[in-house]
Image (cartoon, rainbow, N blue to C red):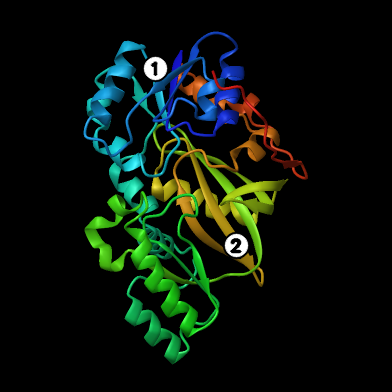
Amino acid sequence: MNILFTCAGRRNYLINYFKEALNGVGTIYATDMDLTAPALIDADVAIKVPPIYDPDYIRILKSAIKDNLIDAVISLNDLELPILAIHKLELEETGAKLIVPNRETIEIAFDKWKTVQFLEANGLKSPKTFIDFDEAKKAIESGELKFPLVLKPRWGSASIGIDFAENVRELDLAYELQTIKLNRTILAEASKDDVNRAILIQERIIGKEFGMDVLNDFEGNYVGNFVRQKLSMRSGETDKAISIIDSRFDAIGKCIGDNLNHLGNLDCDILEKEGKLYVLELNPRFGGGYPFSHEAGVNTAAIYLEWLRGGNTIEKFINYKEDIMFSKCDRLLRVN
């Protein structure tokens, strides 16, 4: 079994979880545009590829999949998912399975405005959101929208470009600055089709923060959800968390899994305010909070391998326990 992780970056924990699950019967490959990326050091084989928006990216990735007899491809980057979805059939001609949702599913998750519409259409709560700046200002004047507010790219990743506004002047300044800076980031390409509505203005929900992994099988059928309370964050990722078991999240997880029909793991953020749960974002991939679920008893790496081998005996890999607390830390890796 040969597994390829694309845009591997700093996801060393996933590389090692899958290596443990393979138990020596298979090889872990990883790609990145920089051969010094930390995750490539823990992979069995490191492959350098061009940036995801390079015209040759898919051709080179396809060659890597074919040349190395890859059985499954797992993307670890939000911005790459839409690209892989477009070329999914072409890449799967190699015989590899791309564990990537269809284009419609990715579009709902990647476009945060469509995420809000999806959540509301399925009866789930989300923060009040606007994509038209003038309409947001009118809503503030009428009292429909109240400070504090969050401004963030509509097509965003890894907390790039998030600002907060406590009053109208801060809102004006933050919106103008984000408009200017958006074109300088990697998000410019993703935002180019609707650049005038590429920034979300959203009410800021202040309360307990949770991360939830929603697991579907490779046919898009809901399997289960696993929740952790976030205790601290760093650079947009969960830094410290504790596992919880709370039936209130089950209906949310099942609703997302049944209606989004994503493949494999999905990471989502949830906030609690006055006893109500608000869903913020959907990321149909392994997120930075997955290690907390793994260490609390759900071995999604082993589940993936079971499914890839054609089996469905996954109960032994799910033993989720509450009150398991973990904290991340940095480690040094020798770069050769």
The residue pinned by badge 2 equals 271
Q: Does the residue at mark 2 contact the one at mark 1 (Cβ under 8 Å)?
A: no
Which residue lies most toward the front here? Answer: 336
**Could one spot residue 129 in this view of the protein?**
no
Percent across and percent down for residue 306 are 51, 20
In depth, the one of 322 and 59 nearer the eye is: 59
Viewer-proximal residue, 318 or 1? 1
For this orientation, the residue located farthest to the top is: 25
In this rendering, the answer to whether 13 lies above or below 138 is above
Q: Residues within 10 Å of mark 2 (few under 14, many from 20)?
A: many
Label 2: state its secondary structure.
strand
Residue under the image location 44 percent in, 50 percent down: 157
The kind of residue tagged 2 is: Leu
- Name the residue at 32% across, 74% down: 132
- The quadrant holding residue 192 is bottom left
Tell me if 296 is positioned left or right of 8 in this view: right
Residue 90: where, in percent of width, then height? 22, 26
Residue 152 percent coordinates (x, y): 44, 63
Placement of 216 over or under 191, stated as above or below: above
Identity, as a three-letter code, of the amino acid under mark 1: Asp
**Residue 312 shown left or right of residue 83 in the figure:** right
Q: Which quadrant of the figure contains the C terminus?
A: top right
Q: Which residue is mark 1?
A: 71
Which mark is first along the chain, 1 or 2?
1
Position above or below: 232 against 71: below
**Which residue is at 49% across, 13% downward?**
27
